[in-house]
Amino acid sequence: HQSGFTFLQTFPPSYFLEIFDDEEYDCRTPDGWLSLGTSDGHSDHKPIPAKALLPNADHASSDATLCQSVDYSWHLVGVLHYSLEKHQYLVQKVLQRSGYTDTNKSQIPTPKILKPIFYWVPRIRLLFSGEDPRIFVERIQFALNHRALTEARLFQQLAVDCMPRTPSLSSDSLQRIKALALSTPGLRCETSVKSRLTAEEIKLEYDCIMNRVIFEQLTKDDLKDFLHFTLPPKEHTLAPLKGRIKPLFINTLYQGWGPL
């Protein structure tokens, strides 16, 4: 819930969450995080401790792309590298070795050598140990809200485009709009082809606006059939109190081209 908007996610999301990630939440750049693994006088790079959302099955694909049929959980990892092309971090999963030690510590089982597991993960699924987890939660919540809002707007636009066309703009109204538009000095010299295309765009915009009004009213009246969908908030554009108009240039008889 954000800015009075609520979206009931009854269908699987269509877009990956990292598309809507806001990098302004990050307190360091990728190079800044990786530099924490180096020390003065040493060329060795140590893994950066973190937690990553990874598949529970170790035999999953190394790209760790989210899939509905795979179980995921947060695992301890070490961050090794960052790819500028993928915009992802290369992490190595910390393997938890199973074993026991008796009271006298006389029998210690030989640990099994396990093959290291690497994954490429986006930043939204990687929590560094050196960052504030509360800010990270806000980052995830922002991405979730932004994705839900975007999908709601896309669904609304798709529904409006698929609706049958209502009685379109009358020819008298269209001619009046065209006459007012062509009375502008910058549009007087428009050709017939441009004028026809402009008229088609006006009719198309009118049809879309009318269908959008019908769709919004329908979703408000029929809550049972549109239970999974809530209209996104309208974007209100405020008109400025003051504005400037670019000067018009005219060709005078004695002064040549100059401002009007």
Image: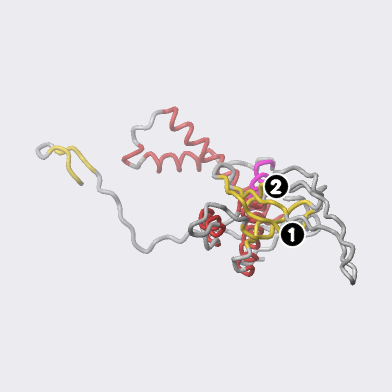
252 vs 89, nearest the viewer: 89
Left or right: residue 152 versus residue 85 is: right
Q: Is residue 54 left or right of residue 232?
A: right
Q: Residue at x 48, y 32 (%)?
A: 197
Q: Mark 2 and 1 residues: CB-CB less than 8 Å, in contact?
A: no
Magenta range is 153-162
Image quadrant where one finds the N terminus: bottom right
Q: Is residue 220 magenta?
A: no
Vertical order, 104 against 204 (above or below): below
Q: Nearer the viewer, residue 234 or 21?
A: 21
Q: Quadrant of residue 5?
A: bottom right
Residue neighbourhood size for the residue with mark 1, other residues' Cα within 10 Å, grouped as few (<14), some (14–19), many (≥20) = some
Q: Position of residue 184 (x, y in %)?
A: 34, 42
* Residue denoted by label 2: 118
Which residue occupies the extreme left position in the image?
Answer: 254
In the structure shown, which secondary structural element does the residue marked by tag 1 occupy? strand
Residue marked by disc 1: 74
Give the distance between the C-alpha atoms of the residues marked 2 and 1, in whole angstroms. Answer: 15 Å
Foreground mark, 2 or 1, reads: 2
Residue 71 % position (x, y)? 81, 53
178 relative position to 216: left or right: left
Residue 101 on image: x %, y %:
87, 66
Q: Quadrant of residue 47?
A: bottom right
First-in-chain label (2 vs 1): 1
Q: Is residue 178 above or below residue 69?
A: above
Q: Position of residue 105 (x, y in %)?
A: 87, 68
